[in-house]
Amino acid sequence: MSSLAETFARDRRLVILRLLSEQDGYALSANMLTKAVRQMRHSVYDDTIAADLVMLEQHALIQRDEERHGQKTIVVATLTRLGQDVAGGRPHPIVDQPSPKF
């Protein structure tokens, strides 16, 4: 992955963690995360967010759950305590650090 692509990916993962940290219950569906990340000016597809969620889960920053609703499977991401720490500024190699607040 190019340096610029990795920079965008790290920022996108920070956006995901911050969105989850702002929700009651610290959880959102993958579909809602895709829509919200797009509103944050990231041009992404569903499979990009799905891959980010797998990576974030592998690093124990979120928990992924799959819920069956008829023929459809909905993926729900829930922030972990470590994920909340990283969203708040704790350094992590796959997630960008937030800018300082003034």
Image (cartoon, rainbow, N blue to C red):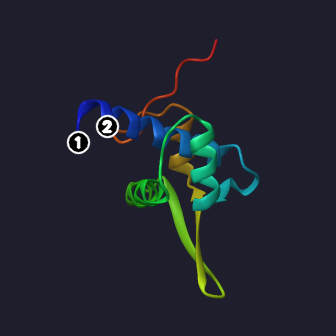
Which quadrant is home to the C terminus?
Answer: top right
Dividing the picture into quadrants, the one containing residue 75 is bottom right
* Residue at figure coordinates x 46%, y 29% from the top left: 97
List the residue tagged with mark 2: 6
In the depicted structure, whether residue 98 falls above or below residue 77: above
Frontmost residue, 60 versus 65: 65
Marks 1 and 2: in contact by CB < 8 Å?
A: yes
Marks 2 and 1, Cα distance to the nearest angstrom?
Answer: 6 Å
Which quadrant is home to the N terminus?
Answer: top left
Q: Secondary structure at mark 2?
A: helix
In the picture, measured across the screen, residue 38 lies left or right of residue 43, that is right
In the picture, measured across the screen, residue 51 lies left or right of residue 33, that is left
Number of disc labels: 2
| Residue density around tag 2, few if under 14, some if 14–19, many if 20 or more, within 10 Å | some
| Residue density around tag 1, few if under 14, some if 14–19, many if 20 or more, within 10 Å | few
Frontmost residue, 38 versus 80: 38
Residue 12 screen position, x and y as percent: 47, 40
* Residue at figure coordinates x 47%, y 34% from the top left: 90
Residue 1 numbered mark, or none: 1
Residue at the far right: name it.
24
Type of the residue with mark 1: Met
Frontmost residue, 18 versus 35: 35
Dividing the picture into quadrants, the one containing residue 37 is top right
Q: Along the polypeptide, which appears first: circle 2 or circle 1?
A: 1
Residue 47 screen position, x and y as percent: 43, 60
In the depicted structure, whether residue 53 falls above or below residue 100: below
